[in-house]
Amino acid sequence: MSRTFRALTAAFVIAVASLGGALYLAHERGAHEESFLDAGSGVATLDLRALLMNASSADQRMLDNAFRQVEKAYYKPVNAQVLLDGEQRELVATLKKHDIARPAIPAQRATGDEDRDIGALNKDLQIAQSQYGKQAGNVELTQAAIRGMLNALGDPYTTYLSASEIGSLEESLKGGDFGGIGVYIVQDTRTKRVLVEPIEGTPAFHAGVKTGDEVVGVDGKPVASMKLDDVERLIRGRVGTTVRLTLRSLRQTGTHVVAIVREQIYVPSVHARLENGYDYVRLADFGQTSYDEVRKAMLDGKAHDAKGYILDLRNNGGGLLEAAVEISSLFVPQGTIVSTIDRQGDRETKVASRESIGAAPLVILVNKYTASASEITAGAIQDYKVGTLVGTRTFGKGVVQSIYNLSDGGAIKITTAKYVTPLGRDIQHRGIEPDLVVDQPVDASLIDTPKDQQLAAAKAYLKRIARR
């Protein structure tokens, strides 16, 4: 893979960082929708009128569950009025997008009684669906109600994820194992052109797709006005099926069509190499396979008598909390890696797994887009002084999200705790100051190139250490 495209891929990770962060997955905690249903609100307690009003519909149950889970799990006290206002605003905004000029969705008042507040929440959704469902669609209105309620908290990490979004998130955290053709795909922020680079050995590579090829169409559908996620969904599909890409190559005016049979594709989260005796390991995210990949790369450096190690966490937007703890444990022999603190002040401590591999001397590269799980690892390494941080101040995302499944295949992602480093540092909105500050424009195309001043500073530091 070319250095520029690797950097562009890292930049794309930044764009989806808000879906990542330090995450607990619902299936890992047993926090599925059923676990927070109100056991006292079964059908037996409802009268005929309530049934006719469809008060126990799947849409409203889903809205109920989202409300209850936010009130129960959000890391700060929640004002029910804020949630009701958020729902009403988003329903109105969604209906206006469907050319309904003055949607009659009344503002509701919270009472502080959970059941009554949920009833008020349901009332607005019911009005929207009964009066405007044919124009806007009941599914879209339900999602708007949930999204508006969550967005009203003003927390960019607490949000509704559609079935496709949660699928993409889980896929990325599993290491990118999917049916596809094997390309890195990015969108030029200025021209909106969709560009690809084939991964060596994949179907796209063997079909002759070249680095920098522009995707003009997929199976005959023009992609000029599409979002990147939509283009990706068209390219991916069942293993064994064929996708036809209309491509325009660099410095070419014409297009050509390439037919490619989809295969199971695995995209690693680590890029590593040994150069001039130094082991360079760049980690794109903290997924389910990241610990094994980082460990293997570091041990390979040790096997080749590396003089020093560089772990590049620049532009790494985070991922799984457990992956951050495991990777930190490669360098921290023992002790606390991170502590999470929920709304009640209850603290859960994650400790090193005592699997340190003794990779030293160690430099961690960081920048303003080093966030969340990346900051957990950087903070632990800095607190224990087992490595030196080089670069610029990190992003400052010191909160943890949990994901709770919903019956529509989507999920709600809720900030459930804040975290502190081993020395008790709360980095939310503060970030982590590196030990050695090296300013460099946040330009993904500079990373791992001769113009990369931060990487050069890391190598120079390791050389000075070796001369001591």
Image: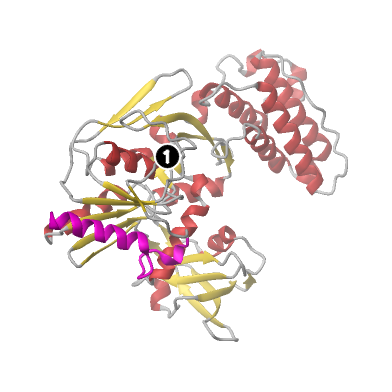
Relative to the observer, which residue lies in front, 390 or 189? 390
Q: Is residue 225 above or below residue 104?
A: below
Question: Residue 377: where, in percent of width, then height?
Answer: 32, 42
Secondary structure of the residue carrying numbered label 1: strand
Kind of residue sitting beneath label 1 = Ala
Q: Position of residue 176 (x, y in %)?
A: 40, 55
User: Is residue 170 one of those drawn in magenta?
Assistant: no
The region drawn magenta spans 443-468
Which residue is at a point 61% across and 60% down the rendered structure image?
227
Q: How many marks?
A: 1
Q: Is residue 460 magenta?
A: yes
- Magenta stretch: helix, strand or loop mostly: helix
Q: Residue at x 36, y 69 (%)?
A: 449
Tell me where residue 105 appears, x and y as whole percent.
82, 32
Question: Residue beneath label 1, please?
Answer: 22
Crowding at mark 1 (Cα within 10 Å: few <14, some 14-19, many 20+): many
